[in-house]
Amino acid sequence: MTGRYSLILILICLFAGQAFSQPDNTSKKVDALLAKMTLEEKIGQLNQYNGDWAATGPVTDDLRDKMKLISEGKIGSMLNINGVEKTRAFQEAAMKSRLKIPLLFGQDVIHGYHVTFPIPLAEAASWDMEAIEKSARVAAREAASGGIHWTFAPMVDIARDPRWGRVMEGAGEDPYLGSHIARARVRGFQGKGLGDLEAVMACAKHFAAYGAAIGGRDYNSVDMSLRTLWEFYLPPFKAALDAGVSTFMTSFNDLNGTPATANNYLMRDILKDKWKFKGFVVSDWGSVGEMIKHGYVKDNAEAAEAALNSGTDMDMESSSYVNHLARLVKEKKVSQENIDDAVRRILRKKFEMGLFDDPFRYSNADREKKTLNHPDHLEASRDMARKSIVLLKNERNILPLSKDLKSIALIGPLAKAEKDMKGFWTVELGQKNDVVTLHSGMQKQAGKTSLLYAEGCAINDTSKAGFAEALKVAASADVIVMAMGEAHDMTGEAKSKANIHLPGVQEELIKAVMATGKPVVVLLMSGRPMVFNWTADNVPAILYTWWLGSEGGNAIADVLFGKYNPAGKLPMTFPRSEGQIPIYYNYLNTGRPSMGDNDLFYRSAYIDLPNTPQYNFGHGLSYTSFKYSNLKLSKDSMGTRDKITVTFDLQNTGKYTGEEVVQLYIRDLVSQPVRPVKELKDFRKLSLKPGESRTLTFTLDASKLAFYNDELKQITQEGEFKLMIGSSSKDIRLDKSFFLTK
Ligand code: BGC
């Protein structure tokens, strides 16, 4: 190397070394700003208030008061202010404050913004990470164009109790699938990264264990072993963090007696110390103040002290921080250092989003107009919706519907549903006629087949007055399609239910229609796993369509008429009765396992109900069939630093091109502590043409066999494992044993 080149190389190395050793530029900017701030201004940054629910409504007096507080530097973030016009007006108020620190606008963008996507639980049924990421991407693009910087999503709470109304918002019961989905959603929302105009900050919520509310009652206490917490409930949070999630939200529940909002173990020990989370934590709505009702603190001042000291950086709506922190600092109950740390975390995000360069960069009316409701977004929503549908049953291949039918009767209270098709947690922007109903979706694809219609009954009513008309319509049709299920406000926040049966007289209507002897297809639209035993046992074809969003009607029609071959798989176990709950596939075997439901003595079972669920985790059929064969392991034992390659063949043995979600489970046969009967450890979704065959490869390494011991350390233990590969957690097609050695 010539002297000249060596010199250049040395200079490059020096420069690079310097860049790496410097505190980053953003930290410098944050510190410089912090140095100028009064204590009151700092506390203002930790305070978040609500705008209003009716996004398009007038600016009320209450909002005018908030604008004044903003201009005094007493609010750092607003939620439920959306649209370019409104966010701009509020940001202008922030620009009147002494230091002109921009506001952050947060919003629950849970499954779409203007274009609504399927509810998150439905999307989870797709097991399709690319589609899920895209759904979040579209939601982010639209929300960001409407002035939003921050979505309170994804909800990554594991849920084993379908009575809990918020199951609709998560990814179901499994930590492995849930972790994949958490990552996909964070990637989708945050896109190219903060600062990009199509990215919003994501928020992993609700930290932690909110989904394990006792009895499935929303906001209820959670009592669980730390091992269960680490094993099942924390992994999706860690996955969100690894994907770069910007914020976390605390949960309403107490965890083993300590409210999550003041839970030092969760927020300091785990999140900020062990996991080294660099973003900020927002409380849930009013959850700082609610610690008084928990009986954890006596007043809002104590609540503020407990929450801030435990690591809750921003107070959503309780006013405890803004009213009490200054005094608490003077009394030395809250350290200046803790305040500064919380403020730094929030300012850093504002810098990363480029808001100090241009506080109005998200408020561009032109962009908003061009972005909202873009045809590509509708197409993505339709695609996601089709992928979310689960074919539970299809006897005699009733589906897809033949093109030669003379007439189809569409019956049921959800056939023309709009709001109910969108489901809970939508952003109301005052848009009209933005949902494709099932009726209009089917009408568009029915061709020469005539589409008859009758409502039959209401969603949740005792009246059977509509039955006669429905039966008349049914009698004159070749096939009957029934649109049954829940109203949009029957599953969601504060919508827990003790009775999760199909509501009202709907199942009676199904029985009456079945009595006509005609072929019947039942569609179930809902936010949660429901109980519908008679239907499950007697109706030949059932599609679980959840709440599918703006394009629901088109998507269902695509599936009914065979334009799309369904491939969804249940992300939650469906019980036969509420009495079986909690019910999940990854349970422990016990000393008296329920081997079969005939032998009920001395078995861990009910004497009045089979132990098995109605539908198993991972279940979902296709219009085609798949053959699994030729399972091979590269070796039958491996050391902890080793791996085993698993291969097998999958063949499409039916008549339609179709996708299969291949699932890989393991069981650790002898272990201390004991392990579940099955644990999902990998999956793959792939499409095969009729007759096509493909060899699939999975890799097993020790990380897939590791688990938490009583000291909460991840360990592996030598011994025999069973590997199972199948089409659901129940429908295992191939299995083999292997050994883990030292
Ligand atoms: C919910 C959160 C939500 C917040 C703001 C709370 O009631 O639990 O999930 O983000 O409200 O709307």
Image (cartoon, rainbow, N blue to C red):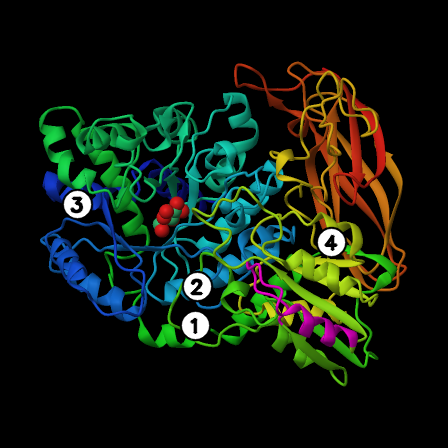
Indicate the position of residue 236 as horizontal and vertical percent values: 53, 38
Q: Any mark on residue 535, and which? A: 4
Q: What residue type is labelled 3?
A: Gly
Read off the residue under disc 1. 372
The front one of 675 and 719 is: 675
How far apart marks 2 and 1 lie (CA) works out to 8 Å
User: Horizontally, is 307 left or right of 449 in the view?
Assistant: left
Question: Badge 4 local density, few (<14 within 10 Å), some, or many (20+)?
Answer: some
Image point 61% across, 63% down: which residue?
385
Whichever of labels 2 and 3 marks the residue nearer the N terminus, that label is 3
What is the quadrant of residue 109 in the picture? bottom left
Read off the residue under disc 2. 113
Q: Are marks 2 and 4 in contact (CB under 8 Å)?
A: no
Q: Are marks 2 and 1 in contact (CB under 8 Å)?
A: yes
How far apart marks 2 and 4 lie (CA) works out to 34 Å
Whichever of labels 4 and 1 marks the residue nearer the N terminus, that label is 1
User: Horizontally, is 153 left or right of 612 in the view?
Assistant: left
Look at discs 2 and 4 and give the one toward the viewer: 4
How far apart marks 4 and 1 lie (CA) works out to 40 Å
Look at discs 2 and 1 and give the one toward the viewer: 2
Q: Are marks 3 and 1 in contact (CB under 8 Å)?
A: no
The front one of 251 and 192 is: 251
What is the quadrant of residue 513 in the picture? bottom right
Read off the residue under disc 3. 44
Whichever of labels 3 and 1 marks the residue nearer the N terminus, that label is 3
Label 3 secondary element: helix
User: Horizontally, is 729 left or right of 322 in the view?
Assistant: right
How far apart marks 2 and 3 lie (CA) works out to 28 Å
Q: Which amino acid does label 1 sit on?
A: Leu
Whichever of labels 2 and 4 marks the residue nearer the N terminus, that label is 2
How far apart marks 3 and 4 lie (CA) works out to 56 Å
Task: State whether residue 370 appears in this view.
Answer: yes
